[in-house]
Amino acid sequence: MTVRRRVASPVLLAFLILVSVVAAGWARGGREVVDHDDHHLEHHDHDHHDHHDHDHDHDHDHHDDHAKMVIPHIDAVALGAGERLRVVASTSIIGDVVRQVAGDAAAVTTLIPIGQNPHAWNPTPRAMVEVERAHVVFVNGLNLEEALMTAIERVSTGKIVPVSAGIVILGDDDDHDHHDDHHDDHHDDHDDHHHDDHDDHDDHDDHDHADGDPHFWFSPANVMIWTRNIAEVLGDADPRNAAVFRSNADEYVAQLEALDREIRSAVATIPAERRKLVVDHVALTYFAADYGFEIIGAVIPTTSDQVEPSARHVAALTELIRHEGVPAVFVGGTANRGVRNLVTAVAREVGNEIRIGEILTGSLSPAGTEGDTYIGFMRYNLTQIVNALTR
């Protein structure tokens, strides 16, 4: 669907000025995304993708492995009597899944603090000491941890493992906006998949993840793959506890399967014509694909929220939101003030009592609050999305 061009109204002209003001105060280091073509706001159909089995490629160093979403070869660690495997996870979400699998058999540390944005967080010296001491460092993959990966690569003495290896990557730059395919399988059988045909979009800042959407955890089916990968890696590194890791993984996968059923039941209560998503940046690709939502667009049309959108893009998105009758715009809990101000400006310009729904995106919530585990994170977001789209 193409946005029709119209002569800007005085209100829209004022809105464009507001967007410029918001952009002027953006987080340091961003660059404006200029002249986004309107095809970013069109609807595209996507072929169904089956997931593929990941290879353990022994010929890559850890830099190539995490960049290519391949799990490196893991040798058994020589642990002393009573010594536990030392494991580091980049984000709180990955850290929770690793703890579910490791139980008490490994010492797990999370690098990025609760509430911090994984796209923007810069490592502290203490965090780098933990990385240097770790036998295994679990990262997301696809350079989600933009400001962190170079430091991890520089100081790590253990293996760097992308937990998302084996997941089919969705959300290339040319298909950010419309993901209405519904995968009913849990990605147990994977075919080889390569994304070599995506378009180059020079308008995007280097922050953008040009190879696809790195927010894999918005699909419980993807987190099942994380769980199996983590159990396999921990078992290779600490064979004496491999059975424990496998058993814990089996139990957690069963919980994730129950979560998937819970989400499907809740989504079924949303009228089909209201299953439309607009988000602050491209993050819900996998959720939309799994559960039959249509992504109308994103205020920041990239998979990183560290990029400034052009006024032209935001104005076109605003018109599209009106045209589609979108009930709500969602903003992530780790979004900076500039992003929040821009989402608020879009909602005000759209009018029609459009809701702003806050969801958790790159971090769990603080301990003891709703969303402080991955399963709680997804349940919180499910409630926010269902409530915003059904009222």
Image (cartoon, rainbow, N blue to C red):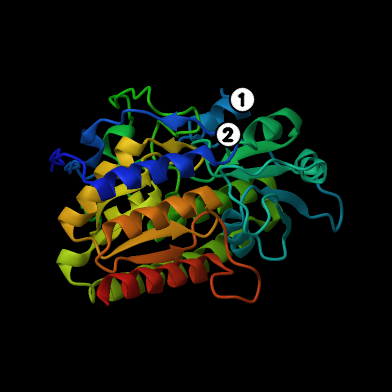
Question: Which residue has dot 1 on it?
Answer: 61
Q: Residues within 10 Å of mark 1 (few under 14, many from 20)?
A: few
Please give the name of the residue rendered at 36% of the width and 40% of the height, measured from the top-left corner.
301
Q: On the rendered structure, is 53 left or right of 113?
A: left
Which residue does the image show at 45% across and 33% down from the upper left? 208
How far across and down, in percent of the image, does residue 25 sit? 55, 42
At which x and y percent is residue 126?
82, 45
Please report whichever mark, 2 or 1, sits nearer to the chain's N-terminal start: 1
Q: Is residue 140 visible?
A: yes
Residue in the image at 38% along x and 26% along y: 203
Q: Is residue 92 above or below residue 254?
A: above
Q: Quadrant of residue 129?
A: top right
Q: Is residue 235 left or right of residue 180?
A: right
Of the residues shown, which amino acid type is indicated by label 2?
Pro
Q: In the image, 38: left or right of 168?
A: left
Image coordinates of residue 115 in percent, x first then y, are 62, 58
Q: Contact (CB < 8 A) between labels 2 and 1?
A: yes
Question: Is 314 drawn above or below residue 196 in the view shown?
Answer: below
**Secondary element at image label 2:** loop
Q: Secondary structure at mark 1?
A: loop
Vertical placement of 68 versus 49: above or below?
above
Query: Can the viewer see residue 54 in this picture?
Result: no
Q: Quadrant of the C terminus?
A: bottom left
Residue receiving disc 2: 72
Choose between 146 and 313: the one closer to the eye: 313
The residue closer to the viewer here, 53 or 346, is 346
Report which quarter residue 169 is drawn in.
top left
Label 2, label 1: how far apart the Cα atoms are: 7 Å
Badge 2: few (under 14), some or many (20 or more) residues near its Cα, within 10 Å? many
Q: Quadrant of residue 260?
A: bottom left
